[in-house]
């Protein structure tokens, strides 16, 4: 017979405690390594991205509230901070220039071009994706290829059309020409989003006697609200920031949009009014930022729906 050796309870307790301590130490080492790896691979690149992304807005903000003495004398003043904040630059922008009118014109053009582009894009995307006519895929690809044509090439023939129609130096010149680069991308985006909506819903409506227009209005569009918001945000942003067409088709100071006006009206020869320029840029970017903040969730969900097959 073999003798069975029974360890005392204290010895077993000490042995178990030692193993637990070893496991805890190894777990602590692994957790610290994973934490360090996460900091290096996630938080450090994210922090760098945020600095690069937000620094222009920070620079515009501090320049807006800096007096001219601090802007022109970096030897005695910190360029990254404000010693004596002032509202003179904003006062000059709002009360000594036509900036409120420029802002109103930009908003009118952006909303008008966005509404026209969305209306046309919805009809085009629905026809290409749902009617399934011969060559619809090539038509959708051709529409998207049209978006890749540079505006610097398009504005030359468009300028001739604008002059012939008598729209030069009016807001309609921009409202009617901006859709030339807004509709192609919005149509492509909505085509991708319409693909994510089950076609069986429309088939059931067709069996019940609904027309295509009724299906589009009552079934497809309510389900495609995130896609419409995403296309609207895209169109509104491009219309708000567009520069080439606004520079070529508008000549009078009171009809200019913000991107063109702050560069052509606030720069006099070789004198740059940096405080007013940065104030105009900062105030001009606020509507777009507010617009994004309200619809960012719909924007992200629509992008994921657009690439979903």
Image: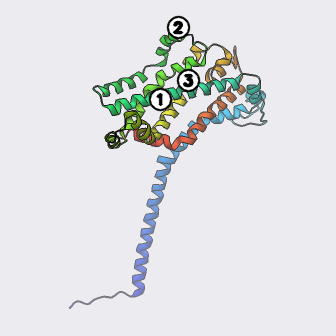
- Rendering coords of residue 158 (x, y %): 49, 13
Give the quarter of the image for residue 259. Answer: top right
Q: CA distance from mark 2 to mark 3?
A: 23 Å
Give the residue drawn at x 35%, y 27%: 140
Give the label, 2 or 3, closer to the camera. Answer: 2
Residues at circles 1 and 3 in contact by the CB criterion of under 8 Å: no
Is residue 29 shown to the viewer in this render? Answer: yes
Is residue 48 shown to the viewer in this render? Answer: no
Q: CA distance from mark 2 to mark 1?
A: 25 Å
Q: Residues within 10 Å of mark 3 (few under 14, many from 20)?
A: many
Q: What residue is pinned by disc 3?
A: 242
Q: Residues within 10 Å of mark 2 (few under 14, many from 20)?
A: few
19 and 299: which is toward the camera: 299
Give the residue drawn at x 72%, y 27%: 275
Q: CA distance from mark 1 to mark 3?
A: 20 Å
Q: Secondary structure at mark 3?
A: loop
Q: What residue is pinned by disc 1?
A: 119
Q: Secondary structure at mark 1?
A: helix
Toward the front, the furthest residue is 209
Disc assigned to residue 149: none
Q: What residue is pinned by disc 2?
A: 164
Q: Earlier in the sequence, mark 1 or mark 3?
A: 1
Quarter of the picture containing the C terminus is: top left
- Rendering coords of residue 170 (x, y %): 61, 16
Residue 242 sits above or below residue 285 on the image: above
**Left or right placement of residue 106 versus residue 31 in this view:** right
206 and 116: which is toward the camera: 206
- Rendering coords of residue 6 (x, y %): 33, 88
């Amino acid at each position: 017979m073999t003798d069975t050796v029974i360890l005392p309870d204290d010895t077993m307790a000490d042995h178990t405690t030692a193993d637990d301590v070893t496991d805890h130490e190894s777990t602590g080492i692994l957790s610290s390594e994973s934490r360090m790896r996460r900091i290096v691979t996630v938080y450090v690149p994210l922090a760098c991205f945020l600095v690069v992304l937000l620094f222009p807005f920070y620079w515009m903000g501090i320049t807006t509230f800096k007096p001219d003495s601090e802007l022109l004398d970096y030897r005695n003043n910190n360029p990254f901070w404000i010693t004596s904040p002032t509202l003179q630059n904003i006062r000059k922008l709002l009360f000594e220039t036509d900036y409120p009118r420029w802002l109103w014109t930009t908003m009118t053009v952006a909303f008008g071009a966005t509404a026209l582009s969305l209306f046309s894009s919805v009809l085009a995307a629905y026809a290409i994706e749902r009617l399934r006519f011969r060559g619809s895929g090539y038509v959708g690809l051709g529409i998207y290829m049209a978006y890749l044509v540079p505006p610097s090439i398009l504005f030359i023939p468009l300028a001739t059309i604008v002059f012939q129609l008598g729209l030069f130096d009016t807001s309609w010149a921009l409202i009617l020409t901006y859709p030339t680069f807004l509709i192609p991308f919005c149509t492509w985006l909505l085509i991708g989003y319409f693909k994510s909506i089950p076609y069986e819903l429309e088939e059931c409506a067709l069996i019940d006697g609904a027309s295509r227009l009724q299906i589009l209005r009552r079934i497809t569009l309510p389900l495609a609200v995130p896609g419409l918001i995403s296309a609207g945000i895209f169109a509104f942003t491009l219309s708000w920031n567009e520069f080439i067409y606004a520079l070529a088709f508008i000549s009078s100071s009171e009809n200019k949009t913000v991107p063109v006006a702050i560069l052509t009206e606030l720069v006099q020869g070789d004198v740059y009014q940096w405080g007013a320029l940065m104030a105009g840029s900062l105030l001009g970017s606020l509507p777009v930022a507010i617009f994004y903040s309200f619809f960012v969730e719909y924007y992200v969900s629509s992008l994921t729906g657009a690439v979903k097959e």
